[in-house]
Image (cartoon, helix red, strand yellow):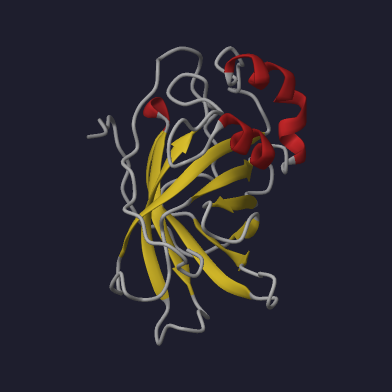
Amino acid sequence: MPVRVESSAPSQISGADSRQSTPQACTLLSVGQAFSGTQNVSNNQKDEAWRVNVRIQGLDLDHGYLCGTMEALNVPMADTPVVTFWEGEIVDGKNYNFFTGKWQAAPEDDIRHWTKFASFCPLMNQVEVDGGKSLDLSGYPCIFMRWKEQYFVNVGTDCGLTIAGFYYVCFSCSDGSISGFYYDPNSSPFQKLELKSTNEGRSGFSFSSYELQ
């Protein structure tokens, strides 16, 4: 949720074709798991980073879906921590692939952002061919996702921040760390999100099945 430059209504997440296997279940990517870290929102004028907390509120691996909340703690223009609700797409080759196909992201934008993650590099050649639809990611040590903030939870849309963009996310199954890069053509490029799992108590809800509207 960087500083607003140009406002845009968030798009709804839409599904993809159904092939390939479900990603491996990872104990650190589960309902109620909390993460803490920073988002770098530096621009040409100044260096700046916000403290960020994330909690997974829902997870449905069969449909490549998850959701959660994101809390930015030291936002200069806000009197209170800013909380947003986000929905995510899990790149599994079945429900979603590496090509976003919406949110103003062209395939070239996708490749530029995914290649920021070292763990993506072995997949690069096949992704360029078909977006990764033919890849079996079920045993891969990382889970790739896109997170799209849907609305502000505790502040109004006039808070000075934007949720028009989305995050390219890489989750490490070995240690639960998360790296991400925010994409919005109207915001500073490659704003980096860095999170580590915490030991907070878990809360949230899971789905036996979930259909996106």
Q: Residue at x 52, y 44 (%)?
A: 29
* Residue 156 against residue 103 in the figure, above or below: below
* Residue 19 against residue 108 in the figure, above or below: above
Q: Is residue 23 left or right of residue 13?
A: right
Q: Residue at x 39, y 22 (%)?
A: 16
| x, y percent for residue 7 | 37, 61
Q: Is residue 154 left or right of residue 91?
A: left
Query: How many marks on residues?
Result: 0
Q: Residue at x 61, y 38 (%)?
A: 109
* Residue 210 against residue 174 in the figure, above or below: above
| x, y percent for residue 205 | 31, 48
Does residue 143 appear in the picture of this structure? Answer: no
Q: Is residue 124 left or right of residue 62?
A: right
| x, y percent for residue 22 | 49, 22
Quarter that holds the C terminus = top left
Q: Residue at x 46, y 30 (%)?
A: 101
Does residue 206 appear in the picture of this structure? Answer: yes
Image quadrant in which you'd find residue 118: top right
| x, y percent for residue 104 | 47, 41
